[in-house]
Amino acid sequence: MAKVNKALFWSLFAAGGTLTAFVFPVLALITLIAAHGSLPDGIPEIVKFQQMQGLLANWFIKLAAFGTVSLGLWHAAHRLRVGLHGLGLRADGAVSVVGYGIALVGTILTAYFLLQI
């Protein structure tokens, strides 16, 4: 009987999809405001770049950021694999290796860059 890794990838996909749906829009808005530099009235000072960098110095926040980015990457990789299969690309082995490989490299880079802060 062949070893099946489907449950592992499915769980990462499900967790990433849920997290992506609820957290990424807010993170994108906060990052956009922080990158812009000037804050509109009513926006707290915490979203300034220096404040966010200081916030990411905390190990718990780093862990949360790592989980958010990593699970989002795994979700995207699995969604891409299933989507390409639905479009008729039947090279599932190659698509899996490339898609999940990119998610793995992204996860490692996320850990690396968060540890640099």
Image (cartoon, rainbow, N blue to C red):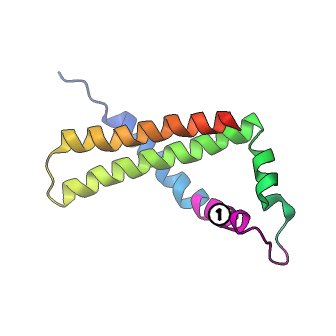
Q: Which residue is mark 1?
A: 26
Rendered-image quadrant of the N terminus: top left
Q: Can you say whether 94 is above or below 72 in the image?
A: above
Spot occupied by residue 66 in the image (x, y as percentages of width and height):
60, 41
- In the rendered structure, does residue 27 fall within the stretch colored magenta? yes
Query: Seen in the image, is 83 located left or right of residue 8?
Result: left
| Element assignment for label 1 | helix
In this view, the residue farthest toward the top is 1
Which image quadrant for residue 30? bottom right
> Is 89 in front, or is 19?
89
Which image quadrant for residue 104? top left
Q: Which residues are magenta?
A: 24-42
Amino acid under label 1? Val
Q: Can you say whether 32 is above or below 91 in the image?
A: below
Residue at position x 31%, y 36% in the image? 6
Q: Can you say whether 56 is above or below 28 in the image?
A: above
Crowd band around label 1 with a 10 angstrom C-alpha radius: few (<14), some (14–19), many (20+): few
